[in-house]
Amino acid sequence: PRGKAMVHSVDFFRALVDDPYLFGRIAANHALGDIFAMGAEAQAATAIVTVPPGLENKVEDVLFQMMSGAVEVLNEAGCALVGGHTGEGRELALGFAVNGLIDENLDSVMRKGGMRPGDALILTKPIGTGTLFAAHARLQARGAWIDAALDVMCQSNRLAAHCLREHGATACTDLTGFGLLGHLVEMTRPSGVDAELNLSALPVLEGAEETSAAGILSSLQPANVRLRRALRNQQEAVSHPRYPLIFDPQTAGGLLASIPADRVSACLGALRALGYQHAAAIGRVLSQGEAIEPIILVLE
C-alpha cells in the first residue's frame, strides 16, 4: 500500500508440548513477536510444518489441531495465513514466515538501537520458559508451573507493543532464544550505551528459580552463557538465584523496551490494565563508560 514499507520475519521450532493446538498458538505468537517489536502490523504468513510419519488420519488430526490454534492467533492479529509447506520428520515442528507493514517514513518503527541514557528498561512478560520446559521434558516440573508458563506464552505481544509505542519507547525487541542478557546486549551495542539490570526486579515464572537451581537448563543455555563477558560484575553476581535466568532462552517471550523514565509509572499501569500482569521496570540505561563490558547487574 502507498505510504507503507514491508517488514519480514521467520521463526521455526519443534513442539515443546504434547497438545498440538496449544503448540500452534505458541508458535504463531513466537513468529509474530518480531513484527510487533518493530512497531509493525502483521499482514500475511506462510507456514512451514514438519510432522512425524504415521497413520494418515492421525497425521491429519494433529495437523488440523495445530493449525487451528495457529490460525486463531493469526486472525486475532489481523494476519492472513496464505499458504505453506508440509514435510515429514522425526518430530512435530512448526514455523511461519510473516510479512508486516509499517509507515514508509519509518517514524513509527521501534528499533533495537534507540536507547538513551536515563531511559528505563521495561519487560512485559516473565522469563523462565527455557528451564521450565527442560524440567517438563524430564518430568520434573509441577503441572501448575507449566500451566502458568503456557498462559504467558499464549499471550500476544501486539497490545504491549502499541502501549510501549504510545509511551515513547525509544528501542524495543522481543525476547527469544538469546535470553534476556543476549537481547539486552543487542540493544546496547547499536545504541552506544551501557545498562543496569536489577536481578531482584526481574519478573520470573513460578518454578523457574527452583528448576534452574537444580541445574535443569535448556540445551541453548550454554551458548547464551558465553555472553557473561558482557557483564561488568559477573563474579559478584554468579551466586544470585536469578543469575542463570538472564541466559535462559525464551519461547514466545515478552517485549524488552526502553522508555523515558518519567513515563514508567503510566506505562506499567497501562500494560497491567491490558493484561500484562507481570510487566516490570527491570533497570535503566546508562551513558557509555570506559569499561568494555556494557552491563552492570544490581544484586539487591
Image: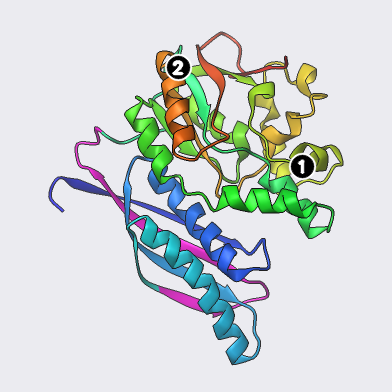
User: Label 2, on which residue?
Assistant: 119
Residue 223, position in %: x, y? 69, 42
Measuring 48% from the left and 29% from the top, which residue is drawn there? Answer: 187
In which quadrant of the rendered image does the C terminus lie? top right
Q: Indicate the amino acid at tag 1.
A: Gly
Q: Is residue 272 visible?
A: yes
Q: x and y percent of residue 171 in the render? A: 41, 29
Q: Amino acid at mark 2?
A: Asp
Compared to residue 290, the image places residue 103 above or below, namely below
Q: Provide residue 204's location: percent of width, then percent of height.
A: 67, 35
180 vs 216: above or below: above
Q: Kindly state the secondary structure of the residue where label 2 is placed.
A: loop
CA gap, disc 1 to disc 2?
31 Å
Pick whichever, 226 or 158, lies toward us. Answer: 158
Residue 3 vs residue 169, the one in the foreground: 169
Residue 86 among those drawn in magenta? yes
Q: Is residue 240 above or below residue 134?
A: above
Q: What is the residue that sits farthest to the right in this orientation?
A: 214
The residue sitting at 58% across, 19% down in the picture is: 294
Residue visible at 58% across and 47% down in the picture: 152
Question: Where on the picture, by quarter, is residue 225?
Answer: top right
The earlier-in-sequence mark between 1 and 2 is 2
On whether residue 295 falls in the magenta region, the answer is no
User: What segment carries the magenta color?
Assistant: 84-107
Classified by dominant secondary structure, the portion drawn in magenta counts as: strand
Residue lying farthest bottom? 56
Residue 282: give x, y in percent of width and height. Answer: 58, 23
- Number of residues whose C-alpha sits closer than 10 Å to that of mark 2, classed few (under 14), some (14–19) or many (20 or more): many
| Label 1 sits on residue | 207
Pointer 1: residues within 10 angstroms few (<14), some, or many (20+)? many
